[in-house]
Image (tube, rainbow, N blue to C red):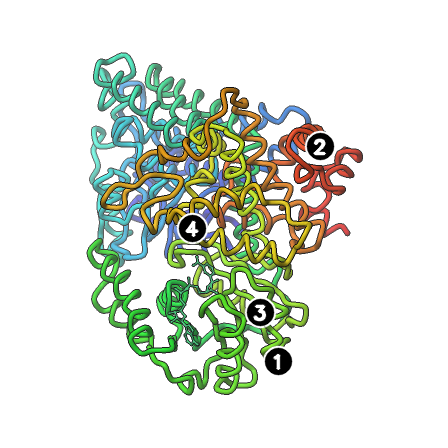
């Protein structure tokens, strides 16, 4: 079955409809591109056709390009894939250019009007097709979003979107759409000129046809195809344009720290394209796009942030048991985490019973949802009706009997095994025997907490990250006795609340915290050694980490660090390796510097609690050494501290799927997204280099950098993590 079909009406309008068989949303596949081109050529050549409307039979227009297609073209092209990718892109450019020129002659006469009718959301190449058309209509669909979000997966709009849109609105105005990948609702899309008209859904096709039948020659000539066209806001050598590009370059480098190849390539395509005629600009765009596709960072980002993230969300590792959708969830503890979990659950349509020890605490927990909804209303994202519905689903109470009928309980009381055991028993007495009990503990082993349960096979860890409404990752932890139904329940719940799950086995700090703690510790350790704190923080930022290790511990609180350190030391005894780190943390905590919450930590804060620079007193406690390490040395310490922990988690079977290790790292603690995650990063730098580098680091800084056996083995075998443990290898095994 075809992806695109065409119907030529008696009114002279050819309607081309995009409708991928068996998919809920259209994506552009190789076959689809060829079909669309052939249909457009047919319509343009047919004298009976006066104009064309391109639309979709689904409630959205398109989700973008099939990203697997780009990977396939690259992989199929052998040793030198760049020319194949370039030819592929130029074919799309030619096809879209044929739509845009629509049979016009050199004098811009005689073309056929082409309108695009978007029933709903249009992203990526969907929007690029629309931009090539002469007029864009969108249905007044409250769910619709229009944009070019390619940058978010490490690409940029490479099917003419970059060149067309920057020429339509100017480089400055194009930035939110191209550089930030913002998806806009119809109204905002109209003011951003991504669409021209918002029309009632049932009039969409009629209005587009009407325009096509009434459009004049002048209506269908793009500005850049007219004589004397000038780039809005100025081309690079125009005084205003010059300022724009200097500013844009500074902004991009400031935001991306130079680690995202796509952002730089995008700006280069706009800058260089603005200096030449349109068709040459498209060629430049294609060349930059190929350079990004050939960069290992972009394929790693696409793999982790798109393909694997989606696979995990769709249940790649879900046990094959029947649907476990949650209808009524009980939440124990209405503090910071419990209140957040209550909000995301109620927002997803689940009935919530929110329990705390005192009624006012439970009420405060519910009020947290009200606060988020009120903010949403102020921004016009939430209606009064929606607010009422969501709040109506939350029952705040102290009465465990209200848990009756809950099919899932999520416990988020104090991090104290005794308190947790007590509420587990109380809840289990009230819930159905089939219900699943989950704990949101961040540090306590699931298997030992499960001892308080009368049905440990129905006991599991569901570990959220703070703030719950913003953080996309949920870590699901299997205890020794956790059964398949519990895992499926947790996965179905995470899917309902539209977050991304990873499933790991039970070991100290599970996966995410296990890797974050060494990152923080390495930063703190360097402070004690006299490394300039600003060097530590900037080294992390230049690796693409959102927060340096010292800012991160300020945010999560230094006393929490102290608490975790004490518990870890108690558990590990003499093997405990982090005394040097603790000396610093304990000292700051003793001085009442607990981080952001006390407006004093590694950083200084002003009266309003706003973070200023590094705390000047830090240099008195830990004088900065005269000899400072290279930036690369500091970066490698920070990087390997995390990735070696990820490798050990895999070796020990805490992680069972490297895709989860990569996706979890990016979503859980902002691990250098450009790298695709710890395992992708190791594959980019190569195991042999990593082993060599780790040996040097271990000799200089200690055994924590000693390469794990698995890394050595891969280096010796000339293998990679994805080569050995990726989905293809797993399927073959
Ligand atoms: P919190 O102190 O903000 O909230 C705990 C709540 O539990 C309080 O409202 C308290 O009144 C209530 N509570 C205590 N004993 C109770 C009992 N017997 N019955 C009913 N309610 C009781 O703590 P939090 O930050 O929300 O953390 C809760 C859990 O989530 C802990 O296990 C913590 O380790 C874990 N966690 C925290 C974070 C984080 O960033 N704060 C992240 C992930 C997991």
Q: Residues within 10 Å of mark 4 (few under 14, many from 20)?
A: some
| Number of the front mark, 1 or 4 | 4
Q: CA distance from mark 2 to mark 4?
A: 32 Å
Dot 4 beta carbon under 8 Å from ligand 1: yes
Residue contact between numbered discs 2 and 1, judged by CB atoms under 8 Å: no
> Which one is earlier in the sequence, the residue at label 1 or at label 3?
1
Residue nearest the viewer, comparing 129 with 574: 574
Q: CA distance from mark 4 to mark 3?
A: 25 Å
| Number of the front mark, 2 or 4 | 4
| Number of the front mark, 4 or 3 | 4
The residue depicted at 60 percent of the width and 39 percent of the height is 641
Residue contact between numbered discs 2 and 3, judged by CB atoms under 8 Å: no
Q: CA distance from mark 2 to mark 1?
A: 45 Å
> Which one is earlier in the sequence, the residue at label 2 or at label 1?
1
**Which residue position is annotated with label 1?**
455
Q: CA distance from mark 1 to mark 3?
A: 11 Å
**Which residue position is annotated with label 4?**
556
Residue 691, label in figure: 2
> Which one is earlier in the sequence, the residue at label 1 or at label 4?
1
Give the quadrant of residue 338: bottom left
The residue depicted at 50 percent of the width and 58 percent of the height is 474
Give the quadrant of residue 546: top left
**Which residue position is annotated with label 3?**
460
Residue 494, compared with residue 70, is above or below; it is below
Relative to 88, 724 lies left or right: right
């Amino acid at each position: 079955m075809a992806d695109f079909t065409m119907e030529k009406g008696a009114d002279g309008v050819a309607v081309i409809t995009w409708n991928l068989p068996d998919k809920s949303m259209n994506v552009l596949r190789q076959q689809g591109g060829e079909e669309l081109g052939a249909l457009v050529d047919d319509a343009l050549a047919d004298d009976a056709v006066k104009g064309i409307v391109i639309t979709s039979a689904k409630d959205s227009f398109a989700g973008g390009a099939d990203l697997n297609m780009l990977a396939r073209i690259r992989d199929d092209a052998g040793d030198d894939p760049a020319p194949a990718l370039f030819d592929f892109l130029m074919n799309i450019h030619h096809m879209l250019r044929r739509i845009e020129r629509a049979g016009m002659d050199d004098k811009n006469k005689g073309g056929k009007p082409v309108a695009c009718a978007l029933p709903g959301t249009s992203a990526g190449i969907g929007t690029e097709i629309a931009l090539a058309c002469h007029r864009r209509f969108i249905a007044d669909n409250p769910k619709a979003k229009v944009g070019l979000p390619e940058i978010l997966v490490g690409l940029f709009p490479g099917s003419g979107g970059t060149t067309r849109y920057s020429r339509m609105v100017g480089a400055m105005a194009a930035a939110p759409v191209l550089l930030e990948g913002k998806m806009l609702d119809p109204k905002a899309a109209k003011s951003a000129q991504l669409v021209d008209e918002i029309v009632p859904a049932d009039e969409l096709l009629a209005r587009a046809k009407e325009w096509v039948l009434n459009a004049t020659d002048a209506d269908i000539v793009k500005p850049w195809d007219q004589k004397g066209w000038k780039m809005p806001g100025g081309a690079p050598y125009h005084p205003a344009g010059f300022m724009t590009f200097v500013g844009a370059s500074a902004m991009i480098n400031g935001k991306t720290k130079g680690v995202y190849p796509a952002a730089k390539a995008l700006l280069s395509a706009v800058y260089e394209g603005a200096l030449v005629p349109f068709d040459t600009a498209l060629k430049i765009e294609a060349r930059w796009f190929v350079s990004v596709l050939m960069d290992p960072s972009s394929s790693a980002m696409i793999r982790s942030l798109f393909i694997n993230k989606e696979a995990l969300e769709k249940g790649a590792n879900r046990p094959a048991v029947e649907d476990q959708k949650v209808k009524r969830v009980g939440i124990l503890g209405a503090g910071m985490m419990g209140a957040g979990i209550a909000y995301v659950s109620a927002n997803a349509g689940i009935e919530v019973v929110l329990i705390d020890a005192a009624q006012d605490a439970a009420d405060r927990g519910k009020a947290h949802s009200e606060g988020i909804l009120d903010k949403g209303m102020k921004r016009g994202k939430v209606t009064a009706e929606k607010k009422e519905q969501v709040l109506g689903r939350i029952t705040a109470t102290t009465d465990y009997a209200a848990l009756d009928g809950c099919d899932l309980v999520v416990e988020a009381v104090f991090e104290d095994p005794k308190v947790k055991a007590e509420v587990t028993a109380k809840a289990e007495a009230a819930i159905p025997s089939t219900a699943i009990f989950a704990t949101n503990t961040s540090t306590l082993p699931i298997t030992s907490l499960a001892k308080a349960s009368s049905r440990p096979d129905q006991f599991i860890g569901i570990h959220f990250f703070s703030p719950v409404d913003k953080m996309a990752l949920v870590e699901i932890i299997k205890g020794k006795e956790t059964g398949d139904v519990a895992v499926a329940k947790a996965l179905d719940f995470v899917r309902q609340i539209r977050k991304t799950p990873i499933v790991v086995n039970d070991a100290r700090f599970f996966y995410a915290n296990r890797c974050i703690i060494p990152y923080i510790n390495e930063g703190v350790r360097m402070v004690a050694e006299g490394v300039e704190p600003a060097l530590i923080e900037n080294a992390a930022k230049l690796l693409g980490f959102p927060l340096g290790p010292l800012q991160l511990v300020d945010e999560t609180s230094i006393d929490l660090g102290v608490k975790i350190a004490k518990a870890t030391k108690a558990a590990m005894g003499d093997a405990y390796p982090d005394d040097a780190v603790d000396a610093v943390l304990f000292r700051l905590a003793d001085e009442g510097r607990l981080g952001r919450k006390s407006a004093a930590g590694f950083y200084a804060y002003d009266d309003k609690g706003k973070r200023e620079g590094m705390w000047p007193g830090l240099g008195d406690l830990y004088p900065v050494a005269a000899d400072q390490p290279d930036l690369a040395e500091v970066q490698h310490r920070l990087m390997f501290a995390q990735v070696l922990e990820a490798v050990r988690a895999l070796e020990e079977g805490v992680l069972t799927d490297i895709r989860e290790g990569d996706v979890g790292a990016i979503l859980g603690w902002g691990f250098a997204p450009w790298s695709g995650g710890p395992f992708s990063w190791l594959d980019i730098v190569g195991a042999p280099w990593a082993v060599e580098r780790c040996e040097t680091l271990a000799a200089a800084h200690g055994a924590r950098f000693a390469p794990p056996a698995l890394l050595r083995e891969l280096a010796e075998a000339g293998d990679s993590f994805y080569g050995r443990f990726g989905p293809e290898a797993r399927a073959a095994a």
